[in-house]
Image (cartoon, rainbow, N blue to C red):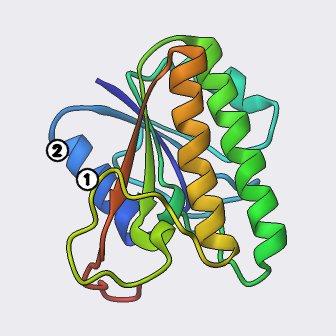
Amino acid sequence: MVVLLVGGGSALMNALIDKLNKNGHRVYLLTGQRENRSSYRHVFEKYNFPYDSGSVKDILESVKPDVTVFTGAYDTNFDWETPRQDGVRYMAGLMNILSAYSVLKKGRFLYFSSQEVFGGSYIDDIKEDEPAAPKGFRAMALAQGEEICANFRKTQGTDTVILRFDRMYWVKGKGE
């Protein structure tokens, strides 16, 4: 299977690359940055372009991924220190990638979100039909990303899946 990962370098990205490679998948990476000095051993091809670049459409047409994974909530390209600007960049990039994906009409699109879209603490388990109640620009951008993915599924007939992770942790490796 051909997999296009979209996101900045992180322990999560490294783990995804290693796992996919170990299972025999061909992995491509869109870094979201003009210059990325990180090297990845098991990536077939790495593309250093911002998400809102016109080249994203060409990349998707060239790679023809079976699965496109947008790391969204866990994308290290967004530090959210300037929430308004990062929110605009985030939404513009996601829209550009989804638009290019919908034209391709091939594969599945995975959007990584988080429990932040609920904005509060809950005593009981959160049900699937619980409406999002984001607090803050980051949580709002993640919730809007979920809505955009759902709308692309409904209106464009794309195979989009929203994965909302709760309390995702990892042990930092040496130097991370």
Please state, as top left, top right, bottom left or bottom right, where the N terminus lies in the image.
top left
**Toward which corner of the image does residue 155 lie, by quadrant?**
top right
The residue labelled by disc 2 is 22
Q: Position of residue 89 (x, y in %)?
A: 78, 57
Find numbered disc 2 in the image and state the secondary structure of the residue it sits on.
helix
User: Which numbered marker is on residue 18?
Assistant: 1
Find numbered disc 1 in the image and state the secondary structure of the residue it sits on.
helix
Query: Looking at this view, is 10 or 151 the one in front?
Result: 151
Query: Looking at this view, is 31 or 112 the one in front?
Result: 112
Q: Position of residue 16 (x, y in %)?
A: 31, 53
Left or right: residue 165 compared with residue 64: left
- Amino acid on which disc 2 is placed: Lys
Q: Work out whether residue 163 can be spotted.
A: yes
- Amino acid on which disc 1 is placed: Asp
Q: Position of residue 126 (x, y in %)?
A: 28, 66
Q: Work out whether residue 30 can be spotted.
A: no
* Relative to 55, residue 91 above or below: below
Q: Within 10 Å of the Cα at label 2, are there few (<14), some (14-19), or many (20+) other Cα atoms?
A: few
Residue located 75% across and 64% down the image: 87
Please state, as top left, top right, bottom left or bottom right, where the C terminus lies in the image.
bottom left
* Relative to 171, residue 19 above or below: above
Q: CA distance from mark 1 to mark 2?
A: 6 Å
Residue located 57% across and 44% down the image: 147
Left or right: residue 77 compared with residue 3: right
Q: Are marks 1 and 2 in contact (CB under 8 Å)?
A: yes
Q: Within 10 Å of the Cα at label 1, are there few (<14), some (14-19), or many (20+) other Cα atoms?
A: some
Query: Looking at this view, is 13 or 169 the one in front?
Result: 169
Q: Position of residue 158 (x, y in %)?
A: 50, 19
User: Which numbered marker is on residue 34?
Assistant: none
